[in-house]
Image (cartoon, grey):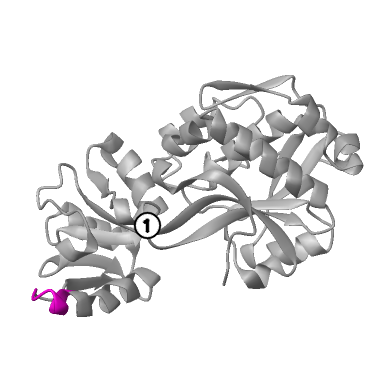
Amino acid sequence: MSTASALSVALLLTVSACGDDASDGAAETPAAASVAGVTITRDAALHAALPEQIRTAGVVRVATDVPYAPFEMFVTEGKPELTGLDYDLGQALGAKLGVKFAFTPQKFDGIVPAIQAGKFDAAMSAMTDNKERQAVVDFVDYSVSGSGIMVVKGNPEKITTLNDLCGKKTAVQAATNQLELLQEHQAQCKAAGKAEIGIQTFPKDSDAQLALRSGKVVAQVQTKPAAGWTAKTADNGSAFEVVDDPAAAGGYGASPNGIAVSKKLPQLSDAIQKALQALIDDGTATKIFDMYGVASIAVKEATKNAAVD
C-alpha cells in the first residue's frame, strides 16, 4: 500500500515484537518492548489482574481489518508484517500487561461475530464505539475522531475553522460523511452573511488531494486521522498540514473509537483500560499517536463504553 512506505517500515522497527503474530497456545512474552522510542516493561499487578486463561496462554488474540491507514497497514504489500497506530498501541499494551497482542487480519464486518464466537478476545481496528455494538462487546476507548481540514503547507488562506471555508473552493470525496458535513454547514455560512462553500466533489480521496496540491481548491475535508497521516507522509511532511480547530480537537462530528473486548472477559477489558491509562499518564500513548500525525485524536482518559448513542 502506498501509505505504508519507508516511514512505516522505520516505525515498525521500533517495536520488538512485530508482524502477523497470530499463534495457538502459549506465547513467550518479552521482558520489555520498545514502542515509539519508549521501553515498556510488565506491570506485575496488571498482569495478575488478567483472566486466568489469558495469563496461561500468554496471548491476547486481536482481530484487525487491514489496511486502513494510519490505524492498520501492511509494511509491504503482499507481505503479512503489520504496522500502524492500532498495531503499535497493541504492542505497548501487551508489554504493559505482560502478554502478547497477536494481530490477525479479519474482514471488518466479521470482527464482532468472530469475537462473539470466541475466535478472538479483542479487536483493534479503528472501530467506532456505539450503543449497538456495546450490546455484544465492551469498548475501551482510546481516541475520538471525526472530520478534519487539510490545507497546503503554510496554510496561505489562513483557514482555522469550517467557517473559513465559506466562499472558498473545498475538495471532498463524494458520498461521504465529510460531504454531508459541508452541505449542512452551508446554512451557517448564509447566516453569517457569507457565500456558500464551493464544494468540489471527487470520486476518490486521492483525486481530492490532487486538486488541493494543484491549487484548484484551498482545502480538503476528510477524516481527521487520514488528514493527519497524509500530512505526515506526503512529500516527507512538506506538502500539507492539518487545521486544528480548538473547538473540535478530534475533528468535526467526532465519535469515540475503542478496543472491542469480548463480554465474556470483563477482567481483560478492565486490565486493558488500566494499562492504557498508564500509557497515557507516562506520555507513551501521545508519542505513539504523534508518530502517525494524529496526536489530536488521543484521549486523556481511558474510558469504557463512552458512546451514548
State the image coordinates of residue 176 (x, y, percent, origin top left).
Answer: 38, 72
Tell me the magenta residue range: 189-194
Depth order, front residue of 68/193 = 193
Is residue 248 shown above or below 15? below
Number of numbered discs visible in the structure rendering: 1
Depth order, front residue of 68/286 = 286
Q: Residues within 10 Å of mark 1 (few under 14, many from 20)?
A: many
Residue 191 in magenta? yes
Q: Taking the image as drawn, is residue 22 in sight?
A: no
Query: In what element is the residue under mark 1?
Result: loop
Compared across the picture, whether 303 is left or right of 172 comes to: right
Q: Taking the image as drawn, is residue 13 in sight?
A: yes
Find disc 1 in the rendering and name its residue: 251
Depth order, front residue of 96/222 = 96
Q: Tell me what residue is drawn at x 63 percent, y 39 percent.
A: 276
State the image coordinates of residue 173 (x, y, percent, origin top left).
Answer: 32, 68
Compared across the picture, whether 193 is left or right of 178 comes to: left
Is residue 56 shown above or below 39? below
Quarter of the image with the C terminus in it: bottom right
Compared across the picture, whether 28 is left or right of 231 comes to: right
Q: Toward which corner of the image does residue 282 lie, by quadrant?
A: top right
Q: Toward which corner of the image does residue 177 lie, by quadrant?
A: bottom left
State the image coordinates of residue 152 (x, y, percent, origin top left).
Answer: 18, 48
Give the amino acid at mark 1: Gly
